[in-house]
C-alpha cells in the first residue's frame, strides 16, 4: 500500500465527515509514518506511546478516544490489547 495514496484516500474520505477532528488526522498520519519508519505494510503493531509521540498527543485519554473512533467510523481496524507488554494491532483498509 502506497503511503501517499493511503493518506490521500483518507483525506478524500473525511472531506464531508464532520466527526473527524485534527486529532484524528494527526493519529492517522502518525500511523502511516510509523508504518513507513518500520517497513511494515499491514497490519502494524504499536504501543500507544509510540503513536502519541509521532502525533504530538500528550494525553492517553485523547489518543484512545480518537483511535477508537477511527475504528468505529471504519477508517482503520483497531485491536487493542490489555497486556502492557504486547502491542495493539492496527489494520489499514486495503484498496
Image: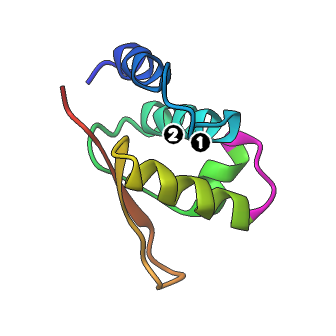
Q: Is residue 17 left or right of residue 41?
A: right
Looking at the image, residue 4 lies above or below residue 69:
above
Chain part drawn in magenta: 54-59
Residue visible at 77% across and 42% down in the picture:
56
Label whose residue precedes the other's in the sequence (1 or 2): 1
* Residue 30 pos. (x, y %): 58, 37
Q: Which residue is mark 2?
A: 34
Query: What colouring does the structure picture have?
Result: rainbow
* Residue 64 pos. (x, y %): 60, 63
| Tag 1–tag 2 contact (CB < 8 Å) | no
Specify the farthest residue to the bottom.
Answer: 83
Name the quadrant containing residue 25: top right
Q: Is residue 31 left or right of residue 49?
A: left
Residue 58 colored in magenta in the image:
yes
Disc number at residue 27? 1
Specify the farthest residue to the left.
Answer: 95
- Mark 1 or mark 2, which is nearer to you? 1
Q: Is residue 33 left or right of residue 9?
A: right
Prevalent SS, magenta region:
loop
Amino acid at each position: 500500500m502506497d503511503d501517499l495514496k493511503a493518506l490521500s484516500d483518507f483525506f478524500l474520505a473525511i472531506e464531508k465527515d464532520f466527526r473527524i477532528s485534527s486529532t484524528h488526522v494527526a493519529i492517522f498520519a502518525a500511523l502511516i509514518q510509523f508504518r513507513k519508519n518500520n517497513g511494515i505494510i499491514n497490519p502494524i503493531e504499536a504501543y500507544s506511546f509510540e503513536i502519541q509521540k509521532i502525533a504530538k498527543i500528550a494525553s492517553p485519554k485523547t489518543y484512545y478516544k480518537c483511535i477508537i473512533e477511527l475504528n468505529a467510523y471504519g477508517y482503520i481496524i483497531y485491536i487493542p490489547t490489555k497486556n502492557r507488554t504486547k502491542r495493539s494491532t492496527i489494520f489499514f483498509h486495503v484498496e
